[in-house]
Structure formats: C-alpha cells, structure tokens
Amino acid sequence: MLLAWILGLISCKAVAYLQGVSVCASVTTLVAISVDRFLAICYPMTLQITTRGCRIIIAAIWIFSLSLSLPWTVYFQLVSIGKSSYGDPLYVCREVWPTEQMGTVYFLVANLVICYLLPLLVFLVCYGSIWYRLCSRVLPGEGAHNNLLAKRSKIKVIKMLFLVVTVFMISWLPLYAVFIRVKVGGT
C-alpha cells in the first residue's frame, strides 16, 4: 500500500512537472523561431545567429522551462478523497498551494503571461515586422511578370505568418479561458 502511494505521488508530481516543462519549452522554442525569422528577414546581413548562439538559446530555453515549472513539483500533491468500496484509500492529484492566492498569482504570471500573452505579443511584433518588410520591399528587376510572381510569393508568406499566430492563439485560448475561469472566477 505504501509503495502504491509513493508511486502515485511520484507520478503526480512528475506528470504535472513534465507537462509544464514541455508546454513551456514548446512555446519558448516557437518564440525563438519567430525571432530568428524576424532577424533573417528584417536584418539579413547584420544580425545572424551563430551555431554557438543557437546552442546557448537552446540551453536557455530548457533551463528556463525546467525552472518555470519547478513549483509544480512542490505543490502538486496526492489528496485523499475517501475510501473505495474495498476500503482502500482513494487519492487524487491536485495543486495544493499554501494560499489560494499564491496558486492564482503563479498561474497568472508563469502560465498566462509568460507562456501565452508574452509569446503572442512577440509573434505579433516579429511577424508584423516581417509582413511590413515584405510589403514595402521592392525586388530589383521586378517587371510585369516578375511583379505578379513576387506578389503571389509575398501573399503566401503573409498567409503563413497570419496562420501561425492565429493557430497559436486559437489553440491555447480555450485552455487558458477555462483556467482563468477556475483560478480567478471560482469553480
């Protein structure tokens, strides 16, 4: 029985932590990609990320993600919810913060702001700058035929940029809306 409880506790903490790390690392990687695209398109000759710089960015993404989710290893716990029909204790894995406000503040800052709103803002700034740069750029030798081809190419890129931001925003919005409702608005 004790072994089952210990394994349950380890699973409770590990699953919550690894979910948080993977979400944070994924979102932060998308931010790094959007900044890299911005630099490559808007400043192609002046600002380039080297191999060493890329390694540092990847390490920073993982250190940041591992650190940001660390409180979940402390505050996710097994909570007793009664006994089964066989008399065995039943447990559920839940966030148990010293105060409810601490959990709300952590969610608002670490999850909502750092993992959703700030990345969304970075995407909008980077991709908005790319869009502006593409729309205002005139390629040398653009004739009537080449102009149409360049215009189609620009439209494809702009659609892709718009799609990336929209899909990110729409994909995560329902989850964050539910969590905001639960954490801030009550259950």
Image: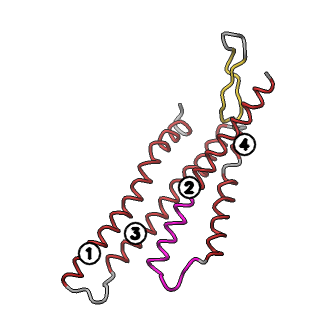
Q: Is residue 56 above or below residue 74?
A: below
Q: Which of disc 2 and disc 3 is earlier in sequence?
A: 2
* Mark 1 residue element: helix
3 or 1: tag closer to the N-terminus: 3
Asked if the residue under mark 1 is in contact with the one under mark 4, i.e. CB atoms within 8 Å, the reply is no
Residue on which the image places disc 1: 151
**Residue drawn at the location 72% of the way across and 37% of the way down:** 98
Which residue, given by chain and number where applicable, does mark 3 sit on? 128
Q: Amino acid at mark 4?
A: Thr
Residue closer to the observer: 75 or 2: 2
* Residue in front for this viewpoint, 13 or 98: 13
The colour scheme applied to this rendered structure is secondary structure
From the viewer's perspective, tell me whether residue 146 is left or right of residue 172.
left
Describe the element under mark 3 as helix, strand or loop: helix
Numbered disc in front, either 4 or 1 = 1
* Span colored in magenta: 26-49
Label number found at residue 73: 4
Tell me the residue that label 2 is attached to. Answer: 26
Which of pointers 2 and 4 indicates the residue nearer the eye?
2
Determine the secondary structure under disc 2: helix
Q: Residues within 10 Å of mark 4 (few under 14, many from 20)?
A: some
